[in-house]
Amino acid sequence: RPPGPASPPSLPPPTGGPGGDASRSSEMAEREAGTDPALPNENYKLCRILCERRNGWTLRTFCRGSYSAVCTQHWRNGYQTARCVSPWGEWIEKRMQESQCCVDATLRTKGKTGVPEADNATRSFCLVHCDDALDREREWTTSEVWEVCRHHMS
């Protein structure tokens, strides 16, 4: 029987932490290189997105969803909207066209009995970062979003 294709000897073996978690090693490599994972928007109004109950987000679902989403864009009334889908949910984002800031993101709850309650981590984030009126309207950069989200990705 002829041998199957062999890997060239010049390629290093696959890396990953204990247990072969390649996604975590790629995440760590990005941090070491000084870059954060990509997001579809330049800025986010995190307080408005996460702390308004009607939006239906927790920190964990927002972070996991945003970093794995595929979005289609539409333009209307000065806003750019995007319908986004990820393994953690479907949602509609509203963005300001000129600033590329996501000002609202509403998780789709069709077929569910209601809007999910915020978990302790989300409530804590809202109390610490969104208590003041000026803080609630703050635009968070992608680096700042990553600093919040990196703890909620697993």
Image (tube, rainbow, N blue to C red):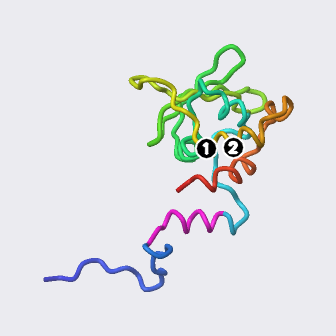
Residue shown at the point (69%, 69%) measured from the top left = 32
Where in the figure is residue 119, as x and y percent of width and height?
Answer: 57, 41
Identify whether 67 is placed above or below 29. Answer: above
Amino acid beneath label 1: Asn
Can the viewer see residue 88 in this picture? yes
| Quadrant of the image containing the N terminus | bottom left
Crowd tier of the residue under label 2, counting other residues whose Cα lies within 10 Å: few below 14, some 14–19, many 20 or above: few
- Neighbour class for label 1 at 10 Å: few (<14), some, many (≥20)? few
Q: Which residues are magenta?
A: 20-30
User: Quarter-wise, where is residue 49 in the image?
Assistant: top right
Q: Which mark is residue 124?
A: 2
* Residue 51 screen position, x and y as percent: 67, 32
The residues tagged by marks 1 and 2 sit, at their Cα atoms, a distance apart of 6 Å
Prevalent SS, magenta region: helix
Depth check: give the residue in front, 154 or 6: 154
Image coords of residue 90 (percent x, y): 48, 32
Q: Is residue 65 left or right of residue 104?
A: left
Side (left or right) of 126 relative to 40: right
Residue drawn at 76 percent across, 44 percent down:
141
Question: Farthest left residue?
Answer: 1
The extreme right residue here reads 134
Furthest toward the bottom, the residue is 9
Residue at which label 1 appears:
120
Image coords of residue 146 (percent x, y) = 68, 51
Query: Image point 69% across, 13% down: which residue?
Result: 77
Q: How many marks?
A: 2
Q: Is residue 22 magenta?
A: yes
Residue sitting at 80 percent across and 30 percent down?
137
